[in-house]
Amino acid sequence: MQIPFNKFNSFYLKNKEKTLSKLDKVLNSGKYIRDKEIDFLEANIKKLTKRKFTITTSSCTDAIFLALKTIDIKPGDEIILPSFSYIASLSPILMCNAKPVFVDISPETLTLDFDLIKKAITPKTKAVIFVQLFGYSQDLSELKSFLKGKNITLIEDAAQALGSKVNNLNGGEQGDLSCISFDPTKIVSAFGTGGIVLTDNQEYYDKLTKLIHHGRNKNGEFEILGYNSKISELNASIINLQLENLDSILDKNNNIANQYFAELANNKSIKLLKPNLNQFSTYHKFVILTKNRNELRRYLYNNGIETKIHYSTLLHEQKLLNNFKFKVHSLQNSEYAKEKVLSLPIYPNLTKEEISYICNLINNY
């Protein structure tokens, strides 16, 4: 068998007629930015995440950057984040000339350790970027309450968390500002790129509406220094179509994950990243940890299976940081994870036979 890590065109191929109809409608309207489809998308996400305000951006990287600008992050301000994450969690901090402070993760969740966040806080700490990973959401209630008492903003990087739940809290529901991605790797995606910022704070929302459109206010005056960060009506229409099918997509991903769990359950050489009883995962990624990660990956590749490593280089190790000031706390668990994590194929049209083929190879190895 030849099994790719993902098939980005699978939704289109299954829903080709509906997709083309949506695109044709937008193209015929002549309205390509900030029209009905974007309004509908923002309303859809607002309902799904139980937030008061949503505003689309051109990417999740922009969403995080604009979230930082919304809370007036200045040069030298300290922002806590994990080193075990994608570059988009870091680059917006550097764009603000703020100082990244890298804190270790929990070995169970692979997300920031609450106790270590508390120990890393200084008078210069202005925000924490909590990255929800691999389609899971962690309950941030305790952390949010603690940070509020310190006047520190919680930014939820929920790029991978749309559709997930924990203790009846939705992915993207918990941050003072939360950011979601619609890039092609995500459960719900644009046929290109896109993002969205979520908040319950009217003041934040009012500022965001200016920042995404060159700083323009409701009177058409350019009031503050802003940016040009918008998603197109075409992409919004495609995302809306996927949201109509979200339950089906998540159901299929969960069925695939459950088959993986069942067929790999007795393998003592790997650790499975599994949800707790209070969590519902979208399985944006299906992740295992193993000592022989690189050798296993090579073996799977030689047998037609494409896998990915998230993340083989920690953020504080990136060459980009040679030109910036930053802080690094002990990252023992992050160092362990980067050597052991392997992501297996998972997408709705992966067949039972293909999953069994992958699991048999892993178990035999």
Image (cartoon, helix red, strand yellow):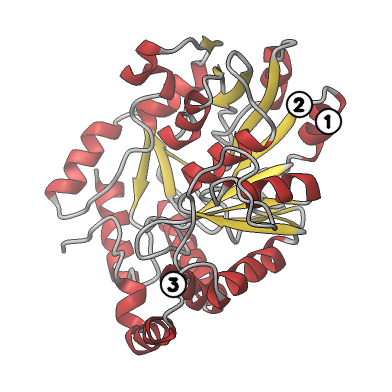
Tell which of 171 and 286 is nearer to you. Answer: 171
Dot 2, crowdedness within 10 Å: few (<14), some or many (≥20)?
many
Disc 2 target residue: 152
Residue at the spot 41% in from the left edge and 64% down from the top edge = 190
Determine which quarter of the picture holds residue 280: bottom right
Task: Return the x and y of residue 350 as percentages of the image width and height.
Answer: 33, 68
| Vertical side of 152 occupied by 255: above or below | below
Proximity of marks 2 and 1: CB atoms separated by less than 8 Å: yes
Which label sits in the foreground, 3 or 2? 3
Task: Return the x and y of residue 22 as percentages of the image width and height.
Answer: 42, 84
Quadrant containing the N terminus is bottom left
Residue at the spot 34% in from the left edge and 50% down from the top edge = 344
Tell which of 56 and 290 is nearer to you. Answer: 56
Q: CA distance from mark 3 to mark 1?
A: 40 Å
Disc 2 marks a residue whose amino acid type is Ile
Disc 3 marks a residue whose amino acid type is Tyr
Give SS at disc 1: helix
Q: Is residue 318 among the parts visible in the rendering?
A: no
| Vertical side of 66 occupied by 168: above or below | below
Residue 148: which disc?
Answer: 1
Task: Return the x and y of residue 177 as percentages of the image width and height.
Answer: 69, 43
Dot 1, crowdedness within 10 Å: few (<14), some or many (≥20)?
few
Residue at the left extreme, as displayed? 302
Proximity of marks 3 and 1: CB atoms separated by less than 8 Å: no
- Mark 3 or 1, nearer chain start: 3
Q: CA distance from mark 3 to mark 2?
A: 38 Å
Determine which quarter of the picture holds residue 154: top right
| Vertical side of 133 occupied by 13: above or below | below
Q: How many marks?
A: 3
Residue 32: which disc?
Answer: 3
| Vertical side of 150 occupied by 298: above or below | below
